[in-house]
């Protein structure tokens, strides 16, 4: 009964007009994924292979954005995008299996034949999960950025709404930690001894902390404000500046043939994020601790 029910579900989804865009976006990734993942197929590899995830990530984000203000849930749309996109994964895995069977000893041929169905199921399942998570993430971001959700209600005469303080505390920790860590690296602490060890430990803490701080900045900036706030923070400006700087520096360093473009991009990201965090915290403090009934602007 379950296979029959699955077939009915598959048929209903394919014929559902609400899912047409999700399925078409997933199908559109197939040629791109094949083009980016096909070269390894020509080598002697074991069953499976590698599949480029960039087209699927872009498709999931696009679908999540598109369905964020529609009746169809982004989760359901992401699932169908992943199902359609998984065709490319199946083709790449099958091609790798054929190459393996033709080039490896007989014992590997048996392993490939037996293991391929499990690899196909695992690969397709991962594609669906990845697309679904990407779609839901894009839906969450789009929803939080929607001004109608964050804008104050004109009929609200209550006190100012204060976002969860844990987010600005994370930003404050980042603002305090970043300068000494980056400064120790720029001042070229000797490559030995306690100073070097502390600098290395500081970097290991600062890099993940910067990612968490970026998320905290976004969540706090997109929290709903009360009617006492004349303008909501420009979350895209605060969060987009560090991300855009990272992409720009990485591209420039790559074009100039730098040996470590990601290193330059990370330092630029940390610096711009620190500036954005300082500016945001300053404006946030002016609003929430400004006192009186004067209307202040944040962002």
Image (spheres, rainbow, N blue to C red):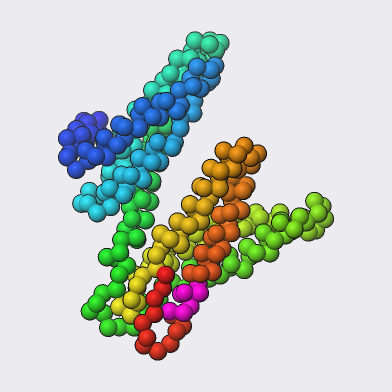
Placement of 206 over or under 175, stated as above or below: above
Relative vertical location of residue 169 with respect to residue 21 in this rendering, above or below: below
Horizontal and vertical percent position of residue 34: 40, 26
**Front-most of residues 173 and 99:** 173
Residue 211 visible in rendering: yes
Residue at image position (24%, 77%) is 154
Quarter of the figure with the C terminus: bottom left
**Which residue is nearer to you in this view: 101 or 33?**
33
Residue range of the region highlighted in magenta in the rendering: 281-287
Of 112 and 251, nearer the camera is: 251
Position of 148 compared to 223: left or right?
A: left
- Seen in the picture, residue 287 relative to 145 is either above or below; the reply is below
Q: Main secondary structure of the magenta part?
A: helix
- Residue 146, x across and y down, in percent: 30, 61
- Taking the magenta stretch, the answer to whether it contains residue 129 is no
Is residue 28 toward the left or the right of residue 89 in the image? left
């Amino acid at each position: 009964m379950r296979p029959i029910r699955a077939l009915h579900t598959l048929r209903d989804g394919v014929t559902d007009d609400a899912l047409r865009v999700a399925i078409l976006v997933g199908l559109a990734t197939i040629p791109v994924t094949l083009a980016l993942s096909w070269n390894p197929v020509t080598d002697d590899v074991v069953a499976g292979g590698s599949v480029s995830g960039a087209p699927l990530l872009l498709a999931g984000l696009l679908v999540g954005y598109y369905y964020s203000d529609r009746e169809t849930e982004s989760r359901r749309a992401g699932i169908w995008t992943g199902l359609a996109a998984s065709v490319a994964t199946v083709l790449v895995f099958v091609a790798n299996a054929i190459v393996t069977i033709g080039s490896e000893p007989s014992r590997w041929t048996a392993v490939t034949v037996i293991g391929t169905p499990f690899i196909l199921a695992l690969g397709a399942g991962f594609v669906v999960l990845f697309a679904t998570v990407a779609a839901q993430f894009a839906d969450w971001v789009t929803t939080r950025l929607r001004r109608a959700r964050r804008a104050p209600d004109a009929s609200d005469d209550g006190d100012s709404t204060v976002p969860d303080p844990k987010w600005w505390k994370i930003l404050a920790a980042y603002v305090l930690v970043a300068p000494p860590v980056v400064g120790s690296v720029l001042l070229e602490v000797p490559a030995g001894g306690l100073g070097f060890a502390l600098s290395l430990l500081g970097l290991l803490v600062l890099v993940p902390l910067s990612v968490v701080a970026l998320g905290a900045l976004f969540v706090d900036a997109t929290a709903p404000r009360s009617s006492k706030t004349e303008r909501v923070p420009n979350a895209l400006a605060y969060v987009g500046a560090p991300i855009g700087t990272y992409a720009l520096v990485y591209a420039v360093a790559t074009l100039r043939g730098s040996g470590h473009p990601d290193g330059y991009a990370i330092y630029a990201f940390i610096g711009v994020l620190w500036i954005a965090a300082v500016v945001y915290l300053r404006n946030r403090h002016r609003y929430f601790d400004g006192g009186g009934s004067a209307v202040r602007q944040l962002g």
